[in-house]
Image (tube, rainbow, N blue to C red):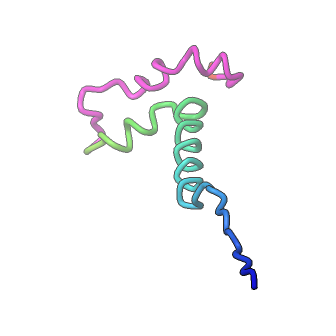
Amino acid sequence: MSKSQQIGVSKPGVSKLALLALAVVFAAGLFVVGFDNGHIVNFVFAENGSTGGIDPLVIHEFTHDMRHAAGFPCH
């Protein structure tokens, strides 16, 4: 008598947690490049109205050319 044996093949996939983390990183990057006008620096460093000697528009200036290349107006 012959025995039949079933072989299971699992498909490798991407976990939902990894997709969620990628979506959060993408959204944060989109905000920084497209919409941040000193908000992050003010939020992180603002204490009693001071930015700790850091220009609030440092991220804006750092990503300025990338904004224009991506089609975001900034001025």
Tell whether position 72 is magenta: yes
Relative to 24, is 29 above or below?
Answer: above
Q: Which residues are magenta?
A: 48-73
Q: Residue at x 27, y 36 (%)?
A: 50
Relative to 27, is 2 above or below?
Answer: below
Q: Which residue is situated farthest in the front direction here?
A: 1
Q: Residue at x 47, y 18 (%)?
A: 61
Relative to 74, is 22 above or below?
Answer: below
Q: Which residue is situated farthest in the top direction here?
A: 65
Q: Residue at x 42, y 39 (%)?
A: 40
Q: Quadrant of the C terminus?
A: top right
Residue 4 is left or right of residue 36, and the answer is right
Q: Quadrant of the N terminus?
A: bottom right
Residue 36 location in percent, x, y? 52, 34
Camera-nearest residue between 54 and 34: 34
Camera-nearest residue between 46 and 44: 44
